[in-house]
Image (tube, rainbow, N blue to C red):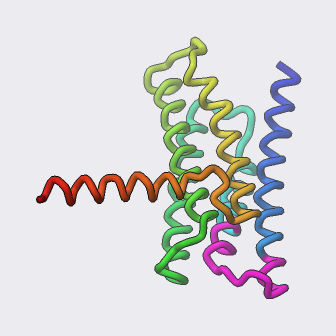
Amino acid sequence: MYLTEHFGLSLGALVVWGFMMAFFFNLFLWFADLKRDKVLLITSFFAFISYFVSDHLFTWFESSQIYLQWALYDIATLGVIFASAFMVKPNLKSPAFFYVVLGLIANTFLFFSMYYDLHVIENTKTWILWDIYSFGVNIIDFTMIVALIVDRDILGLIKLKHVVMSFFKTRRINHSI
């Protein structure tokens, strides 16, 4: 119990640190005039602020309501990122933006699932959702951090999206003939 509790605190701090470093890296690229992508800078800033605030307002004495609070943080973060990014640049092509949005949506789904399982159904027995949540949220967080730093399609998700979209586009054209 002692080890897992401190490991969770350390992992949370590492994620916040990672988002902070991603923001500072993008800020450096902006000021060094190496990459002037406002959407990337805005996305990394708001992702860092969101994780920083949610981590510092978290206490270990919270109930299962914390999952609902984290889901609401992610929804608010998505709203702020979308609003800011579209005001700056309506044509969004940053892979990091795509990965952060997809990651926040996936985390929100996992948070709502855990909240529903623990608070609404009042389940107290561990099952596969808890493992998926534990590994999924952390993997998603680190994937977002890496995507913010490298700003590349690191998992091929954007390429997959284009393949799926072109498949459905051609199927729609063939059915209309």
Query: Could you say where residue 137 lies in the image, as x and y percent from the top left?
Result: 64, 39
Q: Residue at x 49, y 73 (%)?
A: 83
Image height of 17 relative to 125, above or below: below
Magenta part of the protein: which range? 27-44
Query: Could you say where residue 125 lies in the image, as x and y percent from the top left?
Result: 58, 12
Asked whether 42 falls inside the magenta stretch, the response is: yes
Q: Residue at x 31, y 53 (%)?
A: 168
Residue 19 is left or right of residue 152, and the answer is right
Image quarter (top left, top right, bottom left or bottom right) of the C terminus: bottom left
Image height of 3 relative to 103, above or below: above
Query: Could you say where residue 33 lies in the image, as x and y percent from the top left?
Result: 79, 87
Q: Residue at x 13, y 58 (%)?
A: 176
In the foreground, 172 or 93: 172
Q: Residue at x 38, y 57 (%)?
A: 165
In the foreground, 72 or 143: 143
In the foreground, 138 or 1: 138
In the foreground, 161 or 21: 161
Image height of 88 relative to 155, above or below: below
Residue 83 is left or right of residue 52, and the answer is left
Residue 37 quadrant: bottom right
